[in-house]
Image (cartoon, rainbow, N blue to C red):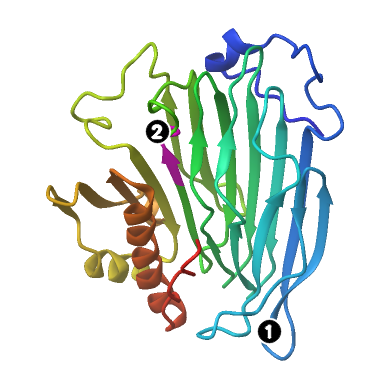
Amino acid sequence: MITDFTQCREVHPYLAEPQAMRVGAPGKCGLLDLVFELTREGKSIMRQWTRHAPLIVQQELYFDEAMPEMPCVYILSSGGPNIDGDRYENKFTLKKGAFAHISTGAATKIAEMAYNFSGLKQNFILEEKAYLEYIPEPTIPCRNSRYITDTVIEIAPSATLFYSEIYNGGRKYYKEGELFEYDLLSICTRAQRPDGQPLFREKLVATPKENPVRPIGIMHNYDVFANVIVLTPEKDAAEIYDKTQAFINRDKRIAAGISYLPNQCGLLFKVLGEESQPVKRIVREFGSIVRMQIKGKPLPKEFVWR
């Protein structure tokens, strides 16, 4: 299935057919469909998984000592970086009471492009009392790349979703440096209840060659941006908000802020930094606050090789 992004006006300059492999050709149209369920013994399992190359998932792992009953799944790609004309689609479903941790095996690189763009469609479905941590590695848009995502979340009022995304400005240490030299980064996220009630919609569009992102109020002197969405019951959101500190550390060049999402559906947490590792650390610290509130267990320390 190829998701149609052509209604988004920001991609209209980039609709030429790639001269190597056409849009959606075999190996360029990845699909994941993962379904998690809770067993009678209280263990969450990946009951069903469908995968089309180049996207890959293997057997779920149970290495989290704080929550040994929680499956940890890593998304891999057999095709290297996202290239001109790639289309990917992910669907993650958590049945009633199920829980899971999903990440990626490495950073997502968006390669240089000449004709088209790379697109990602995501669907998250969380039933009553489900819990999902989605904490992928950073996305790195290279020079002249174009990347667009559309994420739709359907979540029950009693469920919790920790959804994070981190975007580097580019390959900062590649040759002479490559920051904010991509053509397009378009990120849209929206959520609704199972009955269709809309909760929020957020869209970020960056075209740094046409509209510089270095002014104060956008990226300024920061190179890495993290966007974290926590959808959770109103009472839990208030507790998490009270335990989270907004700050600006000018010496370490990192800053974080938090606010409520509309319709009492959760929180929005943003981080700016100079390097990806400190930003990842702040995101995980916030994720640990969320898990402690919902599950009573902290997020484990990150592996040293991550």
- Helix, strand or loop at label 2? It is loop
Name which residue lies at 20% across and 62% down. 245
* Residue 3, quarter of the rendered image: top right
Image height check: is 61 above or below 50?
below
Image point 25% across, 65% down: which residue? 244
What residue sits 68% from the left and 22% below the top? 84
Who is closer to the viewer here, 280 or 201?
280
Count of numbered tags: 2
Q: Within the magenta stretch, is there residue 26?
A: no
Q: Position of residue 23 (x, y in %)?
A: 78, 22
Q: Please name the residue that numbered disc 1 is placed on.
A: 43
Residue at 34% in and 67% down = 285
Q: Is residue 232 left or right of residue 219?
A: right
Q: Which residue is mark 2?
A: 169
Which stretch is magenta? 166-172
In percent of width and height, residue 73 lies at 66, 65
Q: Residue 192, how many percent across, how many down?
A: 54, 48
Q: Nearer the viewer, residue 173 or 274?
A: 173
Q: Is residue 171 magenta?
A: yes
Mark 2 or mark 1, whichever is nearer to me: 2
Q: Quadrant of residue 281?
A: bottom left
